[in-house]
Amino acid sequence: MANQKNSVGEVQQAIKQGAITREYKADVGHVVRALNSLRSTEIMSYLQYMQHQYMAVSLLSPGMKTEFAAHATQELDHANRLADRVQQLGGVPIYDPKEISSKAANVGVAPEQGATLAEMVTEDLMLERQQIEVYTALIRELGDQDLVTRQVLLSILVETEKHASELADYLKRSPNQ
């Protein structure tokens, strides 16, 4: 194919479709909507972790302020990776705060503010577990229909499961549990 001349129509079609070829088997619109929904949960997670970082009393658990901040940074990175994939698929990453809040709420994600450090960690653990379920379901749904999105989701899932494990470990060691 390298030495075969492409027609103007083929070139225009390639420009219009970008990375989407005949071998892409997923419903692009559905995938974009699902990624934007996940992006919303990641942004809400970022906000929750940042609020917990601000509110954590560092004298009681100096490492937790740092841990909350690190998790917040990773959640924002997840949101950005999802936005990149949405754009690659020809979609538009959502950015409207009301729409982000609404989409996150549709899957049960809303920032919470516990009164104690243990409550904050529990809220974060439950949020991470919700995300694990949503990521896992979408990965299974995609199967081999969209290999790149699947890989992006798998890489985020690995980090999300690590967050959940770290939070659960903290709660296991916490005297309040």
Image: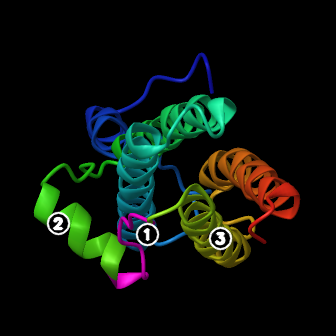
Q: Give the left or right position of residue 72, taking residue 137 as reference.
A: left
Asked whether the beta carbons under mark 2 and mark 3 sit within 8 Å of each other, the answer is no
- Mark 2–mark 1 contact, CB under 8 Å? no
Name the colour scheme.
rainbow
Residue at point 65% right, 65% down? 125
Q: Give above or below for 177 relative to 68.
A: below
Identify the residue at image location x=31%, y=44%.
13
Give the residue at mark 3.
Answer: 142
Marks 2 and 3, the one that precedes in the sequence: 2
Q: Tell me the residue that label 1 is attached to.
A: 34
Residue flagged by tag 1: what amino acid is it? Ala
**Separation of residues labelled 2 and 3 (CA atoms):** 24 Å
Give the foreground label among 1 and 3: 1
Crowding near the residue tagged with mark 3, few <14, some 14–19, many ≥20 C-alpha atoms within 10 Å:
some
Quadrant that contains the N terminus: top right
Q: Could you tell me how far apart the alpha carbons at marks 2 and 1 are, in whole angstroms?
A: 14 Å
Among numbered discs 2 and 1, the one appearing first in the sequence: 1
Measured Cα–Cα span from mark 1 to mark 3: 11 Å
Residue shown at the point (74%, 68%) measured from the top left = 176
Residue under circle 2?
99
Q: In x, y percent, where is residue 9?
A: 27, 41
- Name the front one of labels 2 and 1: 2
In the rendered image, the vertical position of residue 3 relative to residue 57, given as above or below: above
What secondary structure is found at the residue carrying circle 1?
helix
Given contact means CB atoms under 8 Å apart, are the residues at marks 1 and 3 in contact?
no
The amino acid at mark 3 is Leu
Mark before the other along the chain sequence, 1 or 3: 1
The residue closer to the viewer here, 9 or 67, is 67
The residues colored magenta run 106-114
* Amino acid type assigned to the residue bearing label 2 in the image: Glu
User: Residue 69's x, y, as percent?
Assistant: 51, 32
